[in-house]
Amino acid sequence: MGANWVGTWAGGRVREVDGKSVWVIERRVLGGRRVLTLGVASEREALAELALFERDPGTYRTRKQATQDATELAEKAAADAVMLTPELHREFIEDARKEGLSKDYVEHVLGNYLAHWGVALAGRDLRGVTLLELKKLLKGWKSAEHHRIVALKSFTSWLREEGKLHRSNDPTLDLAVPQAKPEKSVRTKGYSMAEVEAVYAEISSQLLRDTLCLRAKASMHDTEIARVARGEALLKEVNDPCGIKGTVTFHHKRGDDHVVSLDAQAFAAALRLQARKKPLTRAPALLMLKRAAKRLREKCETPEETEKIRVIEPGEIRHSFSNWASEYGVLVRPTKQGLPVEEVAAVMGHRSTKTTRTFYKRVLVPPMIQLPLELAHPEDPPIASRTADLNDSNEKSVA
């Protein structure tokens, strides 16, 4: 059906559609004829659109075309949006576990604080978030700034590696991780031996007592204790007259080993953990330690004594060990000390001790730091009998 043209105007002609005037631009542009139907309600609006057209005929878009373009861009942006969704959160956490990061770190640092970011950003496209906005959100949280930044930067780094986010759109690239302040400038770190002894005597869980024993007597990390429990460490009975009951050897991917000498109590604790085949996780450990501190407070007779009772943080026992060893420790050497690796290397003609250590360390029983630390609980089995009993059950794990 042909157009019902009813007149002309400065930009072309006017036609009538359903009783309404429709203004049409008709112009020749770059040797071709352009006909554009304007979605305007008056000739005045049509003239305004004509002025825009004549300013740049090549890029001019009618209101309808501009609306369509904006809709398409919005739909494309929504499809390409990079948001901290629960699905991406789970995928990132799963990959972090596969990378071999400790369960506690993945759960309590990456998982926990990334969830906080997910709530704060409320479905925002990360590509549109500014560094200023991130800093403002950080100021709204009163603690754990370091962990919060690490969690978010770890996530965006993973997104870049997965090809989901480009560096040019990553708002966290210039978000600096604050340098940790020296603990001694903030508070006194570590505990006295009396504090640890008192808490140990209040703990009902043999598993937690064994874990604390390895921390306090051998300065073991969370990851090392977990490896003992999972059977990824080699336990070897020594029975040296000096007091070294056995050793635990950790094999590292880089090819070297870390050997720790243990007394009878610590070695028995390691055997029990390995027989259990599963380490104690952080959450239940902290809960039991809080309950132990509560029971100790209830036994106090004065408010001053009550205030001195602290909840033991397992991670700080390693720092405590360093303090204890410096102040009270006695170095216990195996009866058959052997020769320093440097002397063995010299005799064998090795220019570096690295080659010698590869073999020498496998038979080495390292010195042990002995502390005047008395970890005692009424339910602890006698050390002599429990070690013998556990050796049989642990034989296959050791092998």
Image (tube, helix red, strand yellow):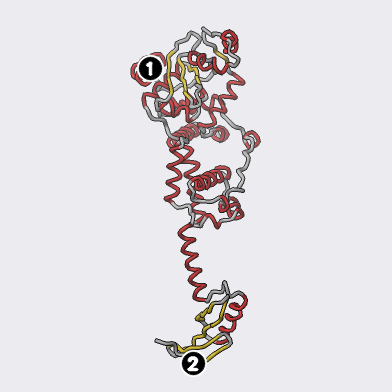
Instruction: Depth check: give the residue in front, 165 or 294.
Output: 165
Q: Position of residue 77 (x, y in %)?
A: 49, 61
Counting every numbered tag in the picture gives 2
Q: CA distance from mark 1 to mark 2?
A: 107 Å
Callout 1: helix, strand or loop?
Answer: helix
Image quadrant occupied by the C terminus: top left
Q: Quadrant of residue 264?
A: top left
Q: Amino acid at mark 1?
A: Arg
Indicate whether 8 appears above or below 362: below
Which of the labelled discs sits on residue 6, or is there none?
A: 2
Residue for point 58% across, 52% down: 168
Query: Furthest residue to the right?
Result: 185
The amino acid on which the numbered mark 2 sits, given as a three-letter code, is: Val
Residue behind mark 1: 386
- 17 up-or-down from 175: above or below: below
Badge number at residue 205: none
Q: Quadrant of the N terminus?
A: bottom left
**Residue 120 percent coordinates (x, y):** 51, 54
Mark 1 and mark 2 in contact? Answer it, CB < 8 Å: no
